[in-house]
Image (cartoon, grey):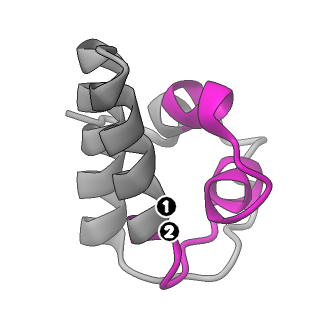
Amino acid sequence: MISDDTQVRDIIRPHRDGGPISRLYATGEITDDTVPALGLCSSELEDQGRHEEADQVDDVLAYVVEAGNRPPVDRWIKSN
C-alpha cells in the first residue's frame, strides 16, 4: 500500500515512459491515459517474471484510481 507521494515516485522512477507515467513521476499529474499506461507496465512486468515490481506498480495504480484525474501538483517534488 502506498503511504505517500515519495513512494509513488520511487516505484515508477524506472518505468518512466515519456508519457503519462513520466508526467506522474515529474509533476503528479494524472490523466485519462495514466491508468492504462500503469496497467500495461504492470502486465509487461508480470510477463517478464518481475512479479514484485508488478505488484508495486499495481499499488501505484490503486493510488491513481483513488486520487482520480488531477492537474500537476504544486510542490510535487519538493514535498517528497
* Residue lying farthest to the front in this orientation: 47
Q: Is 72 within the magenta? A: no
| x then y, percent, for residue 68 | 36, 79
Report the span colored magenta: 9-35
Front in this rendered view, residue 44 or 3: 44
On-image quarter of the N terminus:
top left
Q: Amino acid at mark 2?
A: Thr
Question: Is 46 positioned to the left or the right of 4 in the image?
Answer: left
Q: Quick check: 26 above or below 44?
A: below
| x then y, percent, for residue 14 | 65, 25
Dot 2 crowding, Cα within 10 Å, few <14, some 14–19, many 20+? many
Which is more foreground, mark 1 or mark 2? 1
On-image quarter of the C terminus:
top right
| x then y, percent, for residue 31 | 55, 81
Between the residue at mark 1 and the residue at mark 2, the CA separation in whole angstroms equals 5 Å
Dot 1 crowding, Cα within 10 Å, few <14, some 14–19, many 20+? some
Q: Which corner quadrant of the image does residue 10 belong to?
A: top right
Q: Secondary structure at mark 1?
A: helix
Residue at label 1? 37
Q: Amino acid at mark 1?
A: Ala
Assess whether mark 2 and mark 1 are in contact (beta carbons under 8 angstroms): yes
Please give the name of the residue rendered at 56% of the width and 35% of the height, measured from the top-left corner.
12
Q: Which corner quadrant of the image does residue 23 belong to?
A: bottom right
Residue at label 2? 34
Please give the name of the residue rendered at 69% of the width and 42% of the height, measured from the top-left corner.
16
| x then y, percent, for residue 35 | 39, 68
Please give the name of the residue rendered at 67% of the width and 68% of the height, measured from the top-left corner.
73
